[in-house]
Amino acid sequence: MNESVGTKNPYQYKLKNIEIHEVSLTKNAKSSEQLFHFTIKIENKINQKEKLIFVECQVDVFGHDKVTTLGKITCLCIFELADFDSIINTNSTTGKSEIPIDLSIILNQITIGTTRGVMYSAFKGTAIHFAFLPIVDVKEFQPQG
Amino acid sequence: MHFQLVETELSGDKTTIFTVLPEGSDETLFDKFIRENLPDFKTELIEISKTIRTIANITGAREQFFKHNEGFPGDGVCAMFDAPDKKLRLYCIRFGMCVIILGGGGHKPDGMKAFQESAKLTEENKIMRKVSSKIMVRIKEKGIRWVDEDLVGNFNFTDDE
Amino acid sequence: MSNQRAKKHSSKLITGLLNEITPQEQQRVDKRMKLAARLDEALKARGWSQKTLSERLSKSPSEISKWLSGFHNFTSDTLFDLEEVLGIGLINVSEQPVIEVVNVFSFTVRQVSQLPRIYPERERPGEVVYLTEYLDLKTQAEENKFIYS
């Protein structure tokens, strides 16, 4: 259970499961569509009891008008984290659990990448075959703690 | 018998709910049923409305929710009742999961075994048998057709045809 | 051949009755009838008649018919028996894991031409990167940046 990303990664974790929660293609999807918009929603969840981190990535594919829904995919990566209790802290003011930002960045990046692959496989040969999920630098949108 | 079929606001995604509007009247058979029973059986009417609403929006008109064989064999005439005491009986015609035509009905006293024991229920049942036979003919002659699990066509019925 | 739908007829009496129904009451009937529908589906899936079920549970056929009518208020024991004999889940009593949502991010990206372009304002001026453009971001990501190619 050791998977380091770069030399600075202080965390040890492993991918415990990948779940595909939803794959859908709408009737609007036409192969003539060239330009796609993607709405990406990422949720970080934790299960304290099982010491698991869930990262859910939902991608909605829209056409060039940003309105017409063409497809949707929701993919969940479940991570097991070594030394969970010392890494996942509870905020004393809010009482909410907190995932360190650098860890969240790594797990989000892995999940987006996984979703991209699952999405390619799911939509291969369909009207949105070429709707590759763009490469997103997670660090750029992650709020700074 | 002159009437037209009209769609009620109880219709939902799963089932379209029609009722019968006799010619020259502003009151449908289902409205008449409500008006006649509102003073004594308001709770029961509300129960029936809830059931119809669930059928229309959620479950569809599943066979299990109706009391069958209330008309001629195969004419679709069946009955609905209120839960749990079954004080009221409402006659209707069920066409599969997607269409119900509500008629009239009335109070079914405790201990009554068959609707024929009540003149009112017998009359209401007779009306729905007639309505059903006319619709059956119209469907057979393609004056009313099924399109996307809904009925379309001519919903006006006269005795002259 | 007419292709018309039936006329809509609004009724004050029906509206009056519907206005008396609270969402909670309607939901209870919805659930009761969905439960009855589920039982009926399970019977059909097994190819059982109501009589078969009545024999399996030593009940009268009329009682089974009442269960399927959508009006019956089941006891938990009856539901447990039905789960057992039909092999379906009706009541979930297993402990649910507590899952806490910690972060939510949402944003929109767009594919653009992948022609390389000089991007002078970057840390290393002159570095060749793929065309970068910011699009409408949403929620928490609104203030933040991202890159895509």
Image (cartoon, helix red, strand yellow):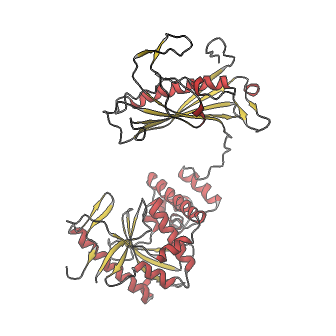
Residue B113, horizontal then vertical, whole percent = 48, 83
Viewer-proximal residue among A14 and A145: A145
Quadrant housing the N terminus of chain B: bottom left
Quadrant housing the C terminus of chain B: bottom left
Viewer-proximal residue among B45 and A142: A142
Q: Is residue A118 above or below residue C33?
A: above
Residue visible at 45% across and 56% down in the picture: C48
Residue B113 visible to an observer of this rendering:
no
Which quarter of the picture shows residue C75? bottom right
Residue B85, horizontal then vertical, whole percent = 57, 76
Relative horizontal placement of residue B9, taking residue A100 as reference (left or right): left
Residue visible at 53% across and 82% down in the picture: B38
Residue visible at 69% across and 26% down in the picture: A100
Residue A37, horizontal then vertical, whole percent = 43, 33
Extreme-bottom residue of the structure: B119
Q: Is residue A58 above or below residue A134?
A: below
